[in-house]
Amino acid sequence: MLRRTILSTSLLAPLSVFASVEAPVQGQDYTVLPTPVQTQNSKKIEVLTFFGYFCPHCYSYEKVISPWAEKLPDDVSYQLIPVAWNENFNHFSTAFYALEATKQIKPYHLKLFDAVIKQGKEFTNINQIADYLASEGMNKKDFLKAANSFTVKMKTDRAMKTWLAYGIDGTPANAVNGKFITAPHMVGTREGAIKVIEKLIEQERKNRK
């Protein structure tokens, strides 16, 4: 689900149609939040990626932004934030944080994406996800223990509060340092969105000097 109203066709448009990512345009390539959102670590520049396992464009974006995020400098923190538009999607957020809690993001985060997007599997509850991940080698008991833990419930609740605070109404999307929102559909390409993020990081870094 790209947005609650679909506008994914912009992702297919040539970059020349959009403002140059070398000089991102406020209101077009990114927006400024009217009220900044408090970040988790004020000592670092925070980058968030909002995603859903049910979102095909999030699946494609993950393959681009994840390798980029692994190379970020020490003054930048990066987090994935699962989005659940309603309670019917909550188990996907729970699954993500259960994988995080068991230190099994790799390889099962992408395996779950593959199952939903490429294989077309429909998971209506956390137990179905647990069964699938177990078939892929995950320890089902450990996964469900984490999924039912207070820590994972707290993180799942926090994720919802976070994307609501940022006013996210579509995925994938990014937030930079509690102040800015950008997204592939705003810029025109996935790679272009990352370039805008880099420019906003540079801007925040300069403001700290």
Image (tube, grey):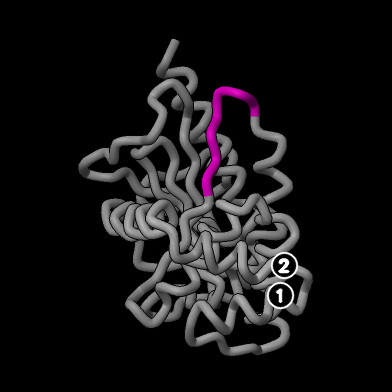
Please, is residue 198 above or below residue 170 in the view?
Answer: above
Give, as a three-letter code, the residue at label 2. Answer: Met
Instruction: Judge left or right: residue 60 versus residue 40.
Output: right
Determine whether the residue tagged by mark 2 lies in a helix, strand or loop: loop
Tell me where the magenta segment starts and ends, as one range.
73-79
Instruction: Judge left or right: residue 182 versus residue 56.
Output: left
Instruction: Judge left or right: residue 145 versus residue 138.
Output: left
Dot 1 corresponds to which residue?
134
Tell me the crowding category of disc 1: few under 14, some 14 to 19, or many 20 or more residues within 10 angstroms, Cα based.
some
Write the residue at 41% across / 29% down.
41
- Residue 37, given in percent of the width and then of the height, sits at 28, 40
> CB atoms at circles 2 and 1 under 8 Å apart?
yes
Give, as a three-letter code, the residue at label 1. Answer: Ala
Whether 26 is among the magenta residues is no
Q: Quadrant of residue 169?
A: bottom left
Instruction: Judge left or right: residue 112 versus residue 157.
Output: right
Please, is residue 118 above or below residue 139 in the view?
Answer: below
- Residues at marks 2 and 1, CA–CA distance in whole angstroms: 4 Å
- Residue 188, given in percent of the width and then of the height, sits at 57, 61
Dot 2 corresponds to which residue?
138
Determine whether the residue tagged by mark 1 lies in a helix, strand or loop: helix
Q: Of 37 and 161, which appears nearest the observer? A: 161
Please, is residue 190 above or below residue 122 in the view?
Answer: above
Please, is residue 67 above or below residue 152 in the view?
Answer: above
Write the residue at 72% across / 82% down.
118
Q: How many marks?
A: 2
Write the residue at 36% across / 48% down.
31
Whether 76 is among the magenta residues is yes
- Residue 91, given in percent of the width and then of the height, sits at 46, 74
- Dividing the image into 4 quarters, which one contains the C terminus? top left
Q: Of 170 and 29, which appears nearest the observer? A: 170
Write the residue at 44% across / 26% down.
204
